[in-house]
Amino acid sequence: MANKTIIKVEPNKQEVFIEREFDSPVEFLFKAHVEPKLVAQWMGTNVIKLENKKHGSYHYETTDPHGNKHGFHGTFHEILPNKRIIRTFKMENTSFPTQLEFFEFEKRGKTKSKLTMQLLYKSVADRDNMLKLPFEFGLNMAHNKLQEVLNHLK
């Protein structure tokens, strides 16, 4: 199965652009990013904290197949329902610095929507190191699961 999530990376730039279209109204796509129960379903994570407001924070924790726990957290800088989320993202217990994330939600008719993400890293080296992880695989897996969750909201 081909990857439906498109990842764009330019040489010598500190950012990654990600695009994915979903068979879902934009309201459901946004809801799946802000409701703890839905986030947990498609991300496969434990939502410890999710404060969907300016200066609110989030904290998620996942468990790998070996039973190791991995946390990540951040702060919301802007939440505009069905339009935009701007937040920071930090993987705990790693050398990766905090990154800045811009999520844009676009209506594409009554039953279609598009998510565009811009991830901004402290340096090109930090971005490149992140991309050495199974970044593309994990993102496509998460977005495929997100589509499944969205299918049940219809």
Image (cartoon, helix red, strand yellow):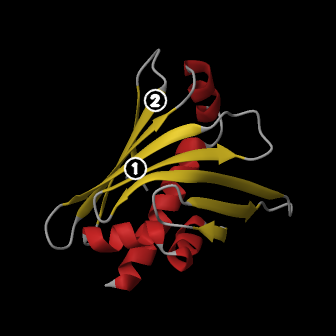
Q: Residue 58 carries which label?
A: none
151 in relation to 133, above or below: below
Mark 2 sits on what residue?
A: 15
- Report the Cα–Cα distance between label 1 and label 2: 16 Å
In the picture provided, is 44 more to the left or to the right than 22? right
Can residue 153 be seen in the rendering of this structure? yes
Q: Nearer the viewer, residue 5 or 128?
A: 128
User: Residue at the top extreme?
Assistant: 12
Give the amino acid at mark 2. Glu
Image position, residue 70 (x, y; %): 77, 55
Q: Residues within 10 Å of mark 2 (few under 14, many from 20)?
A: many
User: Residue at the right extreme?
Assistant: 67
Check disc 2 and report its element: helix, strand or loop.
strand
Q: Which residue is drawn at 68% across and 53% down?
A: 72
Front position among marks 1 and 2: 2
Quarter of the view holding residue 133: top right
Give the amino acid at mark 1. Thr
Check disc 1 and report its element: helix, strand or loop.
loop
Image position, residue 33 (x, y; %): 45, 66
Q: Residues within 10 Å of mark 1 (few under 14, many from 20)?
A: many
152 in relation to 5, above or below: below
User: Residue at the front extreme?
Assistant: 55
Quarter holding the C terminus? bottom left
Image position, residue 146 (x, y; %): 45, 67
Can residue 24 be seen in the rendering of this structure? no
Marks 2 and 1: in contact by CB < 8 Å?
Answer: no
Return the disc, 1 or 2, that comes first in the chain's sequence.
1
Mark 1 sits on what residue?
A: 5
Quarter of the view holding residue 24: bottom left
Image position, residue 50 (x, y; %): 58, 68
Q: Residue at x 61, y 20 (%)?
A: 125
47 in relation to 89, above or below: below
